Amino acid sequence: MNVAELAFVRLFPERKVPKISVEYGKLHGFNARVFLSFSRLKVQLSRRWKDVSVDIQVGCIQGLLLKVYKIKNKRLTLEMELYNNFIRSLADHVPQTRSHPALEAAFYRVNNKFFSDELDPPNLKIGKGVNLLGSYCYQTNTITISRILLDYPDLLDYVMFHEMLHKKLKFYSTKSGRSMHHSRIFRKVEKSYPNAKVLERRLQSLINQTKINSRKSKGFFSRVFGSK
């Protein structure tokens, strides 16, 4: 019995185990995914999972199985709790290998003003997104901030604050197995940021204007370089 079959049996003891294959491949970090096709399951795990205990691997796969079968009210298993604890602890052991001057300056400003310099610097990365202005990855301890914020230090600091809250507060798991990243405490602390509502409106305005400018730019190039 492979690790995915074990995960299935422990999660759904009343069900017949389908055909499940497991592959350790080139996925980044501790990523994993499950594919369902004609009642067959294919589980892909990054090679780094080979050095992790079977129970934690089982918890990872069980969470993916709940998603692929669209089950929302299944109680959290012991293995899923072990997996969540494992993911929460990863950031404490990931070295800082990448940074960016503007993001680093924003991190230290926010860390000093709102976190009493308690947080260790994470990896800092520039993103290209417009709709997604910022994100925090627990597995790689990486904060990614959209490049459209680089010309707006006050907006940059606000988004940095949001992502640093994720780093500090992490996430918790409900009894049904869902991971909650924006808890009541998170929202309460986030709203305490000075002029938060005004900054939210400015962020939305910046997103809208960036999209308009992008459409105009694409229209220009299609007119100038378009074929007949």
Image: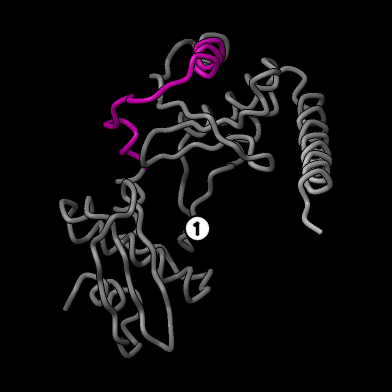
Kindly identify which residue carries mark 1: 178
Task: Give the amino acid at mark 1.
Answer: Arg
Q: Give the range drawn in magenta.
A: 88-110
Position of 9 with respect to 64 (left or right) is left
> What's the coloring here?
one colour
Provide residue 1's location: percent of width, then percent of height.
Answer: 16, 79
Could you classify mark 1 by the number of other residues whose Cα lies within 10 Å: few (under 14), some (14-19), or many (20 or more)?
some
Provide residue 126's location: percent of width, then percent of height.
Answer: 53, 29
Quick check: 127 above or below 181?
above
Asked where in the image residue 163 lies, by quadrant, the reply is top right
Position of 166 with respect to 7 (left or right) is right
Q: Is residue 144 in the magenta section?
A: no
Provide residue 82's location: percent of width, then percent of height.
Answer: 29, 53
Asked where in the image residue 117 lies, by quadrant, the reply is top left
Residue lying at 63% horizontally and 19% vertically, measured from the top left? 157
Position of 127 with respect to 219 (left or right) is left
Quick check: 81 above or below 116?
below
Image quarter where the C terminus lies is bottom right
Provide residue 48's location: percent of width, then percent of height.
Answer: 22, 50
Count of marks overlaid on the render: 1
Residue lying at 58% horizontally and 42% vertically, measured from the top left? 183
Residue lying at 64% horizontally and 21% vertically, measured from the top left? 150
- Residue 177 versus residue 205: which sits nearer the camera? 205
Residue lying at 59% horizontally and 35% vertically, measured from the top left? 134
Quick check: 108 above or below 25?
above
Q: Is the magenta stretch mostly helix, strand or loop?
A: helix
